[in-house]
Amino acid sequence: MDIPRIFNISESAHRIHNPFTPEKLATLGAVLRLRPGTRVLDLGSGSGEMLCTWARDYGITGVGIDMSQLFTEQAKHRAQELAVADRVQFIHNDAAGYIAKEKVGVAACLGATWIGGGVAGTIELLVKSLLPGGIILIGEPYWLQLPSTEDIAKGCLAHSISDFLMLPDLVASFGDLGYDVVEMVLADQEGWDRYEAAKWLTMHRWLEANPNDDLAKEVREKLTLDPKRYAAYTRQYLGWGVFALMPR
Ligand code: SAH
């Protein structure tokens, strides 16, 4: 079981697989006022940077589930490196339907809400693992400006304009589901650049090392087209943020 190989190639050197910088991730941990010993569940935990740095900086414990074998291995390695391997656990698995055995103070899904079939379904899944008074974290894109055509949405690698909302509508949608938005930390263009542009050097080096790989043609095409596509579309049109929610 694994995610499509293109992601394991293009994001192999990423610690954070979303448009957050290390500073934004630390800010998010700080604004949540985490108490030492708080249990955190992370569905789609990637290379584990959130759980590992929060265990180091804020004394949380955590469980992360991710379908990428490579990212899960990197997460375990990072936990060793930061000397928090006794406090965080990483499981290589499909996180769909995952409910924590021991309920948690923070239940998160950052940049992987397809795990629950969309934002509403993911909130519904996460709340099943949540202690009373706990916080849900949802990391999700939103439109900075509404694309005027479907082609622009496709340039942002969305299937259609309806994939995402504008920020005010996204924030209001959490209220409609019965949740207070109690905090939010939003990515900026520097964070987007770090997330997207870091893939280009990784892909270039991968192509040098793997010229005859089955995926070489696809990676070549992506590397040729992505810088312009990103600069023209994603960078201009897409925002990304993490929203902290508590049931009303
Ligand atoms: N939250 C992490 C990773 C976000 S990228 C971070 O912010 O760094 C999306 C992640 O979801 C990838 O790591 C991918 O491997 C994982 N993923 C995709 N489908 C999944 C599934 N069904 N179950 C668990 N993880 C999944």
Image (cartoon, rainbow, N blue to C red):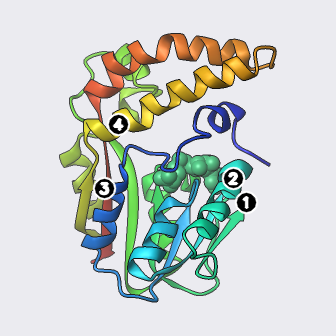
Q: Position of residue 83 (x, y in %)?
A: 58, 75
- Mark 4–mark 3 distance (CA, rounded to whole Å): 12 Å
Q: Does any portion of residue 44 appear in the rendered image?
A: no
Q: Secondary structure at mark 4?
A: helix
Left or right position of 86 against 150: right
Residue matched to label 2:
67
In the rendered structure, which disc, 2 or 4, sits on the residue that comes first in sequence? 2
Residue matched to label 4:
192
- Mark 2–mark 4 distance (CA, rounded to whole Å): 23 Å
Mark 1 Cβ inside 8 Å of ligand 1: yes
- Mark 3–mark 1 distance (CA, rounded to whole Å): 27 Å
- Mark 3–mark 1 CB contact (< 8 Å): no
Q: Residue furthest left?
A: 168
- Mark 2–mark 3 distance (CA, rounded to whole Å): 24 Å
Front label number (2 vs 4): 4
Q: Which mark is residue 24?
A: 3
Residue matched to label 1:
93
In the rendered structure, which disc, 1 or 2, sits on the residue that comes first in sequence? 2
The answer to whether 221 is drawn above or below residue 156 in the figure is above
Mark 2 Cβ inside 8 Å of ligand 1: yes
- Mark 1–mark 2 CB contact (< 8 Å): yes
